[in-house]
Amino acid sequence: MLDRRSFIQGMAAMALPLASSAASAAGTAAGARIAIPARATGNTVAQTIVGLSYETDNLRDPRFFAAANTGLVDAFRRLNPHGVLRLGGNTSDLAKPAGFDGPLPVLHPLYRDRERVQPYYDVNLDAIDALAGFLDATGWKVVFGLNMRAGSVDLVERHARMVRSRLGPRLLALQVGNEANNYFKRYEDYKAAWDRLSAPLGSKGIAGPDSGANTDWVQRFGNDVPESVLLSRHYYREAAERGSLADILLHDSDVDREIAALARAARSHPQGFWLTETNSYYRGGRDGVSNAFASALWGLDFTLSAAFNGATGICFQGGPRRSIESSLEGHDTRGRGIDKRGEDVLARIEAAASNYSPIGGDLETGFAPRPLYYGLLCAQLLAGGRFYELERADPLPGLRVYATAHGDGVRIVAINTSATESRLLSLTGLPKGARVRAAPLRAPGLEARYALAFGEGEGALAPGAGWTLRYRNMPPVARDGGLQLALPAGSALLLHTS
């Protein structure tokens, strides 16, 4: 179990400075040269690009999404002052508004123990009021999922009325159903059910289809429901049991093409295309992978690649382990159980969270960011910028580079996912003599869980830490518009030239 001493030792392992010129690492790393074009002509990174997704059943305790839950409020607000929370998941299809007494079908698990009866649960008005306070405190909006599996028009109408009346402008959209492709095998059957259930909602503030990996469903829904605020689907790399440190760091070019196609399909929808639920590995994430530093590099690359290809928002699934295992019908996500006698707060926060959650902890332990959180935070810092279309964004194996134009200069993110090899990066086309600041994202190793640094500050994962991003000043851009730097193995770097 982690103690304070081992945490400090882990941070000390990262004390070596990042090289600011290629010469210091000559002969030890492969080199790459990337030219920054004169103009940025790519997609603009939406301010909403980084969001979070939680199971609806977290509303069973009004203390969870509440302004008084300051640990969670602070984590949300620091991650993105313009973020969007998606509430949904499998537990949304078991929710009903408190006081609803209409007829409901008996529901059985979709995946295992199919004879067991799944109980519905109430969402109380005080939980929605508390959610409104949480959204006010964070500055976030919400995409709210309604129960489709129950098949009750009255339930959907009453729940929607409750949510709309209490959340008002904080509500970005309502969605009916979560991964309905798991219980409707054909789009036509889903669409017929959606038409019936969503009829009382009207044409404003609705979204969908919130399907799994069904690109065709999203495209068809976009054509069939042109008034949809946004188009949505989900993405996971693989099942948790097939996850590994080597796998998570492989860039998924197939999903790049799918996102680009879906972004084109969503151009006429005001909020474009969203991945409303995503993360590394489904079934709760892989312990030792989804909660390790490797996840920070994956999340950073995945977010920027999705934004480059036109996505407007990406809601990373998270929350307490209890909630995720409930959504998986009791499936054991093979994480570390909470030791009630343990005194180490970081280990308790780690154990309370689902393996892939960007924010660790629960109401009992308190909350703290995890490695993935800082990868997403780094990506969010490119929001508002327009992408340069680089000739080679991945010039060497394991090296990914993104660049965006902002009113105050150019921001560049370079990611080296190699576990063993550093990379030399030569950038050209930058304004000569421009000021350069750097914020490294690094850890003692790809498997590290607790020791991490982003920028010049240390202790980023400590709960309640008053962390702010501090840049390192580097030599200015050369007279020929060039800049050289070394990127250590298993690390990333945010550069800001102005």
Image (cartoon, helix red, strand yellow):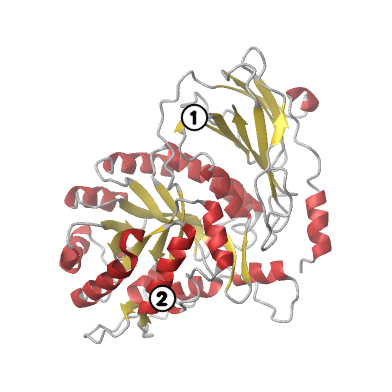
Near mark 2 (Cα within 10 A), the count class, few <14, some 14-19 or many ≥20, is: some
User: Looking at the picture, how far across and down is residue 254, in whole percent?
Assistant: 42, 42
Q: 165 or 451, which lies in front?
A: 165
Sequence-first disc among 1 and 2: 2
Residue found 55% across the figure and 71% down from its top: 321
Q: Position of residue 110 (x, y in %)?
A: 36, 73
Q: Amino acid at mark 1?
A: Gly
Q: Quadrant of the C terminus?
A: top right
Query: In this rendering, would 261 be left or right of 325?
Result: left
Q: Is residue 78 left or right of residue 175?
A: right
Q: Is residue 38 left or right of residue 5?
A: left
Q: Pointer 1: residues within 10 angstroms few (<14), some, or many (20+)?
A: few
Query: Measuring 27% from the left and 51% from the top, which residue is drawn there?
Result: 229
Kindly tell me whether residue 285 is visible in this rendering. Answer: no
Question: Toward which corner of the image does residue 207 lie, by quadrant?
Answer: bottom left
Compared to 429, does 324 lie above or below?
below
The amino acid beneath tag 2 is Ala
The residue depicted at 36 percent of the width and 39 percent of the height is 260
Quadrant position of the N terminus in the picture:
bottom right
The residue positioned 57% from the left and 74% from the top of the image is: 363
Are circles 1 and 2 on residues that touch, CB within 8 Å? no
Identify residue for label 1.
Answer: 407
Instruction: Tell me how far mark 1 sits from mark 2, CA to CA.
Output: 41 Å
- The picture places residue 256, in percent across and down from the top left corner, at 42, 40
Residue 52 in view:
yes
User: In the figure, 57 relative to 15: above or below?
Assistant: below
Q: Please name the residue that numbered disc 2 is placed on.
A: 127
Q: Quadrant of residue 189?
A: bottom left
Give coordinates of residue 48: x percent, y percent.
42, 48
